[in-house]
Amino acid sequence: MKLDFVKMHGAGNDFVLIDDRDERIPWQDHILMAALAARRTGVGCEGVILVQKSKRADFRMRFLNPDGAEVEMCGNGVRCVAVFAHAIGTAGRAMTVETMCGLLKAELTDHGARVWMPEPAKRRYDMKIAREKQPAFQGHFINTGVPHFVVPVPEVGQIDVDREGRFLRNHSAFAPEGANVNFVTFRPPNRLSMRTYERGVEAETGACGTGAVACAVVAVETAGFTLPVRIRTTAGYELVINGQWRNGICTDMTLTGPAKEVFRGSIDTDTLVLGDEME
């Protein structure tokens, strides 16, 4: 099968986007989707996004992690798919997107897109995660569409994100789903720097939209920050998190930032290196 695609990134978080309104893409083939996402033998990305028809919204966004598994949503992915969906004529500049975690509103901006995120939920603040022969990790759990563990640190540049993130992502405290892990440095009154270890990617990612929202909510609700919060991503881009401060909690959160097309092309699935070929 020949697949036409567009490669995009949202603040350094990169995706392969495919128009699947005719629903011919075998997205349930995890091995094939993982091969498409592979850095060295496929197109390479942190997520494959399909645009499909929807009876409830302008379109459905189906998001697949680099391992081929479908997950609830991706904040930067929604921003990229908003730009892509408008370009292929399936949505206007303001749109409704169907995802696994419900209907989301999005709109194009001058330099990217803004998305109204799922309501923050399942807060578990001031958690301690013990580890051998070292001080315990202290952080905050919150679900902003997908689960996140936010760990405040003095300086994110000094953290071994892959090692520490892998430990926390697989910890029993977050079983069975696991959690994305965000290391964040607070820079009052309203700026943060963050680095994220992302489940499914199983490595540090260039940016994480749902993680940025999680870090902003934690900063406002536990550290006295004020909205909007501006966040510097690993790739050096800025994401802006805004919303409402109501009854002591953050609500109606939005994620705004750049969404750029990198290149477009086509690939024959017969050329992809599948799992059994690598054994």
Image (cartoon, rainbow, N blue to C red):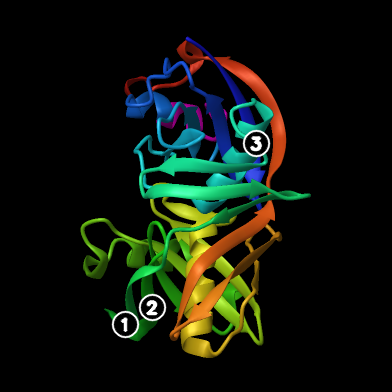
- Which element is circle 3 on? loop
Foreground of the two, 258 or 128: 258
**Residue type at numbered disc 3:** Gly
Disc 1 residue crowd, few under 14, some 14–19, many 20+, Cα 10 Å: some
Residue drawn where x is 66% and y is 53% of the image: 11
Relative to 123, say whether 239 is above or below.
Answer: above
**Residue 28 shows in this picture:** yes
Reading the image, the residue beneath label 1 is: 127
- For the residues labelled 2 and 3, the Cα–Cα distance comes to 37 Å
Tell me where residue 114 sits by quadrant. bottom right
Rendered image: mark on residue 92: 3
Q: Is residue 230 left or right of residue 38?
A: right
Q: Position of residue 225 (x, y in %)?
A: 58, 85
Residue drawn where x is 47% and y is 84% of the image: 221
**Residue 73 shows in this picture:** no
**Residue type at numbered disc 2:** His
- For the residues labelled 1 and 2, the Cα–Cα distance comes to 6 Å
Disc 2 residue crowd, few under 14, some 14–19, many 20+, Cα 10 Å: many
- Which element is circle 1 on? strand
Tell me where residue 45 sits by quadrant. top right
Foreground of the two, 165 or 194: 194
Relative to 177, say whether 217 is above or below.
Answer: below
**Residue type at numbered disc 1:** Met
Give the magenta-colored segment's residue range: 34-43
Residue drawn where x is 50% and y is 14% of the image: 271
